[in-house]
Amino acid sequence: MDRARPRLGYVSSIVLATALAVATSVAGIAATQRMGWIDQARLAAAETDLDNWMGYGRTWQEQRFSPLDQISDKTVRRLKLAWYADFDTIRGQEATPIVVDGVLYTSTAWSKVMAMDAATGQVLWRFDPENDGSKGVHACCDVVNRGVAVWKGKVFVGTIDGRLIALDAASGKPLWSVVTVDQKQPYTITGAPRVFKDKVVIGNSGAELGVRGYVTAYDTETGKLVWRYYTVPGNPAAGPDGAASDEALQRIAGPTWSGKWWTLGGGGTVWDSMVYDSELDQLLIGVGNGAPWNHRLRSDGKGDNLFLSSIVAVDPDTGTYKWHYQETPAETWDYTATQQMILVTLDLGQGPRKLVMQAPKNGFFFLIDRTNGKFVSAKPYVPVNWATGYTADGRPIERPGARYADRPETIYPSGIGAHAWMPMSYSPRTGLVYIPAMEVPLTYGDNAKGAIHPGRWNTGVAFSRNADGKPLVNKGELIAWDPIRQKEVWRHQYDWPWNGGTLATGGNLVFQGDARGFFHAYAADSGKELWSFQARRGVLAGPITYRVGGKQYVAVLAGYGGSMGVATASPFQRYPQLPGRILVFALDGTARTPPEAATPEMPPVQVRDRFTDAQRADGAKWYATFCQICHTGPVNPDLMRSAVAADKDAWQAVVIEGALAGNGMASFRDYLTPAQAENIRAHVAAQAASMRTSGGAK
């Protein structure tokens, strides 16, 4: 079973090689050069540094484009595995690695960090933050981590239990650590930090569970808090926060809220995209959804609820407000604006304009003037029915009934998103944006008067089958989008929605993985598939490319998990549970992965205890409320196949006493009585019996 603190070679802060051994073993590192040395000037010039991948999106523009062309549409057929390294967990892998001077730094699930020789895969050091494993229950979408940041010999990582840690890039030893959230609240951190001007910035997650979002900047040398910006107002009775956001919240955001929004946090977590705009010296923040989702429950159905679902620009030195643009006013569908932002300068017909591009969850591709936050254009890149378009001043034209106030409405895209965390890329060579898109409709119904469970999911939405009774078809696409014409150029369709982040290169290639374990290379101009590799585990993370000793490599993390590995049946439902892995490719690579036997599927559990119909019915309600969100997919244990369900005492020890809290299964004592927990077991027993009768199929 996956554990929060596995020992398979991981020990907190162990240095597996001395600084001298590290320096002499890594290609391109002189013994006197400090590892991980990136500063303001070096990142500012990252576009011309073809050897390295020094930031989350390679450069501060976060275009995820590299001019490297040794691996090209002409040579990609020779692309083979150069090296790989396995992780110690089956949980989701979403990180984008950082490469600096021949060393690859990456985070893995449970916020662990590794440093490896980028040419050979030799592990230089590992770090385990020894998280509070029980915080796994607060992670809406698995205990994932999207990456680290590197700056002046330090590696920064945010942890699932809410810390920001600075590590020595040469040894992995902790240099400082700060708690950046109230750990008594259901906050988590899954996003990658960003660094600039001797500041490291981190956001947080947890809106669905009822928290208030914010971003914090810390001094990279000391860990001292520099500024904090809250994205939504707090309880007015508590007064100002004493934060950089005070003036903007009082003057701009506060009047757009009603009711007692603060009782469930309000939401607005910044769980993914932040971009430092070095040209205009501003930090752009992508703000998330409301808490709860339902606008009628959150704010009495009144007001735009700023700065939810917005791009907000702040001064990078002080955190003070500069401008904002709200993509989905009064959001009520889980339409975040946390998806990747790309900075560009484009000529739309009247001369060059400095723009930010985003393809958020709501299904429209946005161009926003980043000098002032003014709306430029928005066009749907997937089928959309909640709105018919945007007015000239940037307001959506909503379809009557889309807010599901009077009856259930099937909405597309749904809160799953037309585009989620998987990063998109932009090629200046083709002028196209490569979007990992999804079509996942859901039927929303009003549940504003439903029960509230503090600290657990409270959406205010009742989900149901399609109102017309027809099955909802889910699918995914890789879309090549022309941002100037706001038009699709080509599309590759997948039979499963979750498809991976993209990388564009000067070799006329786009790399992308998928949920069925394939890692693909497509021609960037035409979309023709040119190459693929079967990883035997989902490949959803953002790929990178770099060069060591004149040789180009392409690297990507593989490991199915995340929200769909936790909450949804998938192509991997019956696949073997395999550990996460980093895969690194080069022309004429010679590495081979070992054979991997399928994990035998456990039979449905046999529970010999007798239960009443009332117990089973009550248990079905609580199972849907608390269990289904984490135990439907292939990553966490299938409760219908769990031996724990066969024994009342063992079940109570796990569910009520928290016996497996270190593994991420916290105690539910605050939400369930022992009798209710036993009723869930009654429901599980009935479902398992039905599965045995039907031959074990779900």
Image: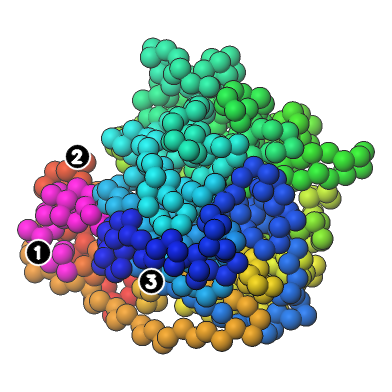
Q: Which residues are magenta?
A: 643-667
Could you say where residue 90 lies in the image, as x and y percent from the top left?
36, 67
**Contact, CB < 8 Å: mark 3 with mark 2?**
no
Q: Which marked residue is nearer to the observer: mark 1 or mark 3? A: 3
Q: What kind of element bears circle 2?
A: loop
Could you say where residue 646 lies in the image, as x and y percent from the top left?
12, 66
Q: Is residue 134 visible?
A: yes
| Pointer 2 residue | 670
Q: Quadrant of the C terminus?
A: bottom left
Q: Is residue 659 magenta?
A: yes
- Pointer 2 local density, CA inside 10 Å: few below 14, some 14–19, many at least 20: few
| Pointer 3 residue | 579
Q: What kind of element bears circle 1?
A: loop
Q: Quadrant of residue 452?
A: top left
Amino acid found under the numbered disc labelled 3: Pro
**Contact, CB < 8 Å: mark 2 with mark 1?**
no
Residue 413's place in the image compared with 558, above or below, is above
Amino acid found under the numbered disc labelled 2: Asp
| Pointer 1 residue | 647
Residue at 26 percent of width and 65 percent of height = 7
